[in-house]
C-alpha cells in the first residue's frame, strides 16, 4: 500500500483540470486516521475550491493552485491506520465525516479523527457520504433558528443538496414546511415533506404573505435581503446560507448588509457559516 489512484487537480479551473494519477498514499499525522475510501460526496464547496472562486478563498486554500490537490470534502470509509494520539477508533472501523480541504476522490485519505463518527451498519457508505456537508449545514440552519413543532418554515432554494435536507429535517421536527424551487422539482420537494411548494420562476417573494413565516431559510441567496426579511413575522428570523455573490468576495458583502439591516430588528437576518459538527452527523445517521 505505497501508492494509489487519485483524481488530482494541479491548478484552479473546471473539470478539465482534474486527472486520474498514481500518487503516494498519505501517512496519518498526529490525531489523524488513514481511511480506505468507500464513498465520497461532492458539494458546492468542492466546486468553489476547484475553481478558486470567489478569489478570497485562495487565501486559505492556496493562491496559485490548491494546497490540497484532491477534491471531496465528504467521505465514508474504513480505518486502515492510526496516527499518534488516536484512541477513539481502531483499524477496521467503518466511519463517516469530513476532510478539511478535501481528499475524498482517492483510494485512501487522511483526516482528523475528531471529524469522524462511526457509520451504523444499516447506513450504506454512499448514503452516509452524502450527509456531512449538506446535511450538517441544514441541521445547523434549523438549530440556529431554533425550529420546533408547529413553526411555519419557508425554504428558499429547496431542491438542492442543502435544501432537500432542510425540508426533511424541518418536517421531522414537526414544522409546517413551505418551499420555493424550480417547477420541475416541486413534486420532489413535496415528497420530502413540504406541505406547500412554489415555482420560484413564476411566484416572486412579493406574492408571499408578509410576516407569514416564523423562519425563512434562504439557501438560494439571490433575493433582495429586504424581500426575505419581509416574509418573517416579528420575533422570527431568517437564516442565510451562503449565496454565490461576486467573483472576488463571494457572499461577504451580502452578509455585511444582512448585519446592518438586522441592527435593532425584530426580524433578524442570521448568516450561517456552517462548520463540521460531529454531533449533527450522529443525529443524521441515527
Image: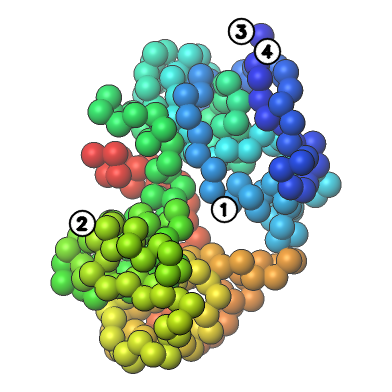
Left or right relative to 70: residue 141: left
Return the disc, 1 or 3, that comes first in the chain's sequence.
Answer: 3
Q: Residue at x 53, y 30 (%)?
A: 111
Which residue lies under the disc numbered 3? 1
Spatial separation of the CA atoms under disc 2 and disc 3: 44 Å
Q: Earlier in the sequence, mark 2 or mark 1?
A: 1
Q: Position of residue 51 (x, y in %)?
A: 72, 51
Q: CA distance from mark 4 to mark 1?
A: 29 Å
Q: Is label 4 in a helix, a strand or a loop? A: strand
- Mark 2 or 3, closer to the camera: 2
> Which residue is the site of mark 2?
172
Horizontal side of residue 87 vs 150, given as left or right:
right
Residue at image mark 1: 44
The first of marks 2 and 3 along the sequence is 3
Inspect this view and state whether residue 150 appears.
yes
Say whether disc 4 or disc 1 marks the residue closer to the N-terminus: 4
Cα–Cα gap, marks 4 and 2: 44 Å
For the N terminus, which image quadrant?
top right
Q: Tags 2 and 3 in contact by the CB under 8 Å rule?
A: no
CA distance for labels 2 and 1: 25 Å
Question: Which percent across, then down, holds residue 175?
Answer: 21, 67
Residue 173's spot in the image, x, y percent?
20, 60
Instruction: Report the disc number at residue 3.
Output: 4
As drawn, is 198 to the left or to the right of 221? Answer: left
Tag 1 secondary structure: helix
Determine which of the numbered discs, if any, sits on residue 22 in the image. none
Task: Name the residue rendered at 66%, 67% in the picture.
Answer: 250
Q: Secondary structure at mark 3?
A: loop
Image marks 4 and 2: residues in contact by CB distance under 8 Å: no
Amino acid at each position: 500500500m505505497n501508492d494509489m489512484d487519485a483524481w488530482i487537480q494541479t491548478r484552479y479551473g473546471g473539470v478539465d483540470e482534474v486527472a486520474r494519477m498514481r500518487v503516494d498514499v498519505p501517512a496519518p499525522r498526529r490525531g489523524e486516521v488513514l481511511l480506505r475510501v468507500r464513498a465520497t460526496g461532492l458539494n458546492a464547496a468542492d466546486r468553489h475550491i476547484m475553481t478558486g472562486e470567489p478569489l478570497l478563498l485562495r487565501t486559505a486554500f492556496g493562491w496559485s493552485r490548491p494546497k490540497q490537490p484532491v477534491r471531496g470534502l465528504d467521505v465514508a470509509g474504513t480505518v486502515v491506520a492510526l496516527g499518534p494520539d488516536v484512541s477513539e477508533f481502531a483499524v477496521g472501523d467503518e466511519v463517516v465525516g469530513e476532510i478539511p480541504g478535501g481528499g475524498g476522490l482517492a483510494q485512501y485519505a487522511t483526516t482528523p479523527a475528531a471529524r469522524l463518527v462511526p457509520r451504523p451498519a444499516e447506513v450504506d457508505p454512499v448514503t452516509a457520504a452524502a450527509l456531512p456537508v449538506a446535511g450538517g449545514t441544514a441541521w445547523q440552519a434549523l438549530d440556529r433558528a431554533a425550529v420546533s413543532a408547529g413553526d411555519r418554515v419557508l425554504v428558499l432554494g429547496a431542491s438542492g443538496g442543502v435544501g432537500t435536507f432542510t425540508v426533511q429535517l424541518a418536517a421531522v421536527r414537526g414544522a409546517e414546511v413551505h418551499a420555493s424551487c424550480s417547477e420541475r422539482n416541486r413534486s420532489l420537494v413535496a415528497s420530502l415533506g413540504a406541505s406547500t411548494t412554489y415555482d420560484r420562476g413564476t411566484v416572486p417573494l412579493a406574492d408571499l404573505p408578509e410576516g407569514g413565516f416564523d423562519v425563512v431559510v434562504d439557501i438560494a441567496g439571490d433575493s433582495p435581503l429586504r424581500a426575505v426579511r419581509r416574509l418573517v413575522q416579528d420575533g422570527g428570523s431568517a437564516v442565510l446560507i451562503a449565496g454565490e455573490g461576486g467573483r472576488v468576495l463571494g457572499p461577504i458583502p451580502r452578509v455585511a448588509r444582512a448585519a446592518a439591516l438586522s441592527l435593532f430588528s425584530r426580524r433578524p437576518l442570521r448568516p450561517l457559516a456552517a462548520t463540521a459538527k460531529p454531533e449533527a452527523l450522529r443525529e443524521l445517521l441515527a
